[in-house]
Image: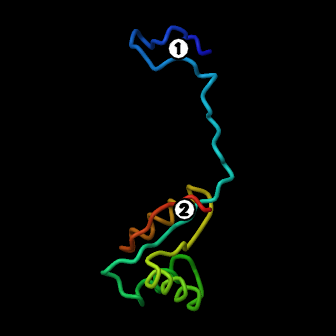
Amino acid sequence: MLPWLAHGKINGVATAPAELEDLDLEYDLDALWQCVVWDDPVNLMTYVTFVFTSYFGYSKEKAESLMLQVHNSGRAAVSSGTREQVERDVAAMHSFGLWATVEKAQ
């Protein structure tokens, strides 16, 4: 047990119970995450295709296929990787004006 938590206080302020040994602190560092782009009423299909080809370097065929998935299904997973990589992709999609979120890959 950490000595400063032995009495459930840090600098005289009460803390949560000091039973740290019982906490499950596992984190799956190997988990894959995905960047999901959502359909929106603003962006043209040609623009979404352009974003996918210019940012991800996808071929026109793959970009059009993903764009149609976004358009018809309402969403498409357009990239996957570590959480940090996917967060960068989501931020890039936002900078292009697309709606995108980070999801844990299944």
Considering depth in this image, is 95 or 6 the residue closer to the camera? 6
Can you identify the residue that label 2 sits on?
Answer: 86
**Badge nearest the viewer, 2 or 1:** 1
Q: Is residue 81 left or right of residue 51?
A: right
Task: Indicate the position of residue 29 as horizontal and vertical percent values.
Answer: 66, 48
Residue at the (45%, 14%) spot, across then down: 10
Amino acid type shown at disc 1 = Leu
Amino acid type shown at disc 2 = Val
Considering depth in this image, is 70 or 97 the residue closer to the camera? 70
* Label disc, if present, on residue 28 of the rendered structure: none
Quadrant in the picture for residue 60: bottom right
Considering depth in this image, is 93 or 24 the residue closer to the camera? 24
Quadrant containing the C terminus is bottom right
Q: Around disc 1, counting alpha carbons within 10 Å, would you say few (fewer than 14), some (14 to 19), or many (20 or more)?
A: some
Q: Up-down: is 102 above or below 37? A: above
Colour pattern: rainbow
